[in-house]
Image: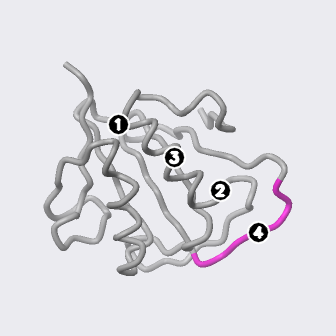
């Protein structure tokens, strides 16, 4: 069976894993995430039929993209190795606002490209900088 993904909390939830979930296709995920961001929901959780989780949290300009294989897994994340600055305004579903090194986040368009590729293929694009935290 192919892996399928659902956007958690898409029917009025907070994107933090509670509430309803709606299946989302790779070709539609960028639009769905842009819509959530425009509506002020900067954190989103995508859940896979295989038990994996894909977290995306944005400050509207950059995003952290983290792929987790199972609960308790330190996971892996998209990176921007040459970036030197820090960015703030990454609002989590619980209201906490975080600041991350730009090296651990990517521009929003790149984040959406990475998420689309993961939903389509199960893995990040080969040309995306990627850090394994395990």
* Contact flag, marks 2 and 3 (Cβ < 8 Å): no
Q: Is 26 positioned to the left or the right of 23 in the image?
A: right
Q: State the CA–CA distance, disc 4 to disc 1.
A: 28 Å
**Residues in magenta, as a range:** 83-89
Residue for badge 4: 86
User: Could you classify mark 4 by the number of other residues whose Cα lies within 10 Å: few (under 14), some (14-19), or many (20 or more)?
Assistant: few
Q: Secondary structure at mark 3?
A: helix
Q: Earlier in the sequence, mark 4 or mark 3?
A: 4
In the depicted structure, whether residue 119 falls above or below residue 15: above
Q: Which mark is residue 10?
A: none
Marks 4 and 3: CB-CB under 8 Å?
no
Q: Residue at x 43, y 80 (%)?
A: 95
Separation (CA) of disc 2 from disc 4: 9 Å
Q: Quadrant of residue 34?
A: bottom left
Residue picked out by circle 1: 52
Q: How far apart are the alpha carbons under marks 2 and 1?
A: 20 Å
- Distance from the alpha carbon under mark 4 to that under mark 3: 22 Å
């Amino acid at each position: 069976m192919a892996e399928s993904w659902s956007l958690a909390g898409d029917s009025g939830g907070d994107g933090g894993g509670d509430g309803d979930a709606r299946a989302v296709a790779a070709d539609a995920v960028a639009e769905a995430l842009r819509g959530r961001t425009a509506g002020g929901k900067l954190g989103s959780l995508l859940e896979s039929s295989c038990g994996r989780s894909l977290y995306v949290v944005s400050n509207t300009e950059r995003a952290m993209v983290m792929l987790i294989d199972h609960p308790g897994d330190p996971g892996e994340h998209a990176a921007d190795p040459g970036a030197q600055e820090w960015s703030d305004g990454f609002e989590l579903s619980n209201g906490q606002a975080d600041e991350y090194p730009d090296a651990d986040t990517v521009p929003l368009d790149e984040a959406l490209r990475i998420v689309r590729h993961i939903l389509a293929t199960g893995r990040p694009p080969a040309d995306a900088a990627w850090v394994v935290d395990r």
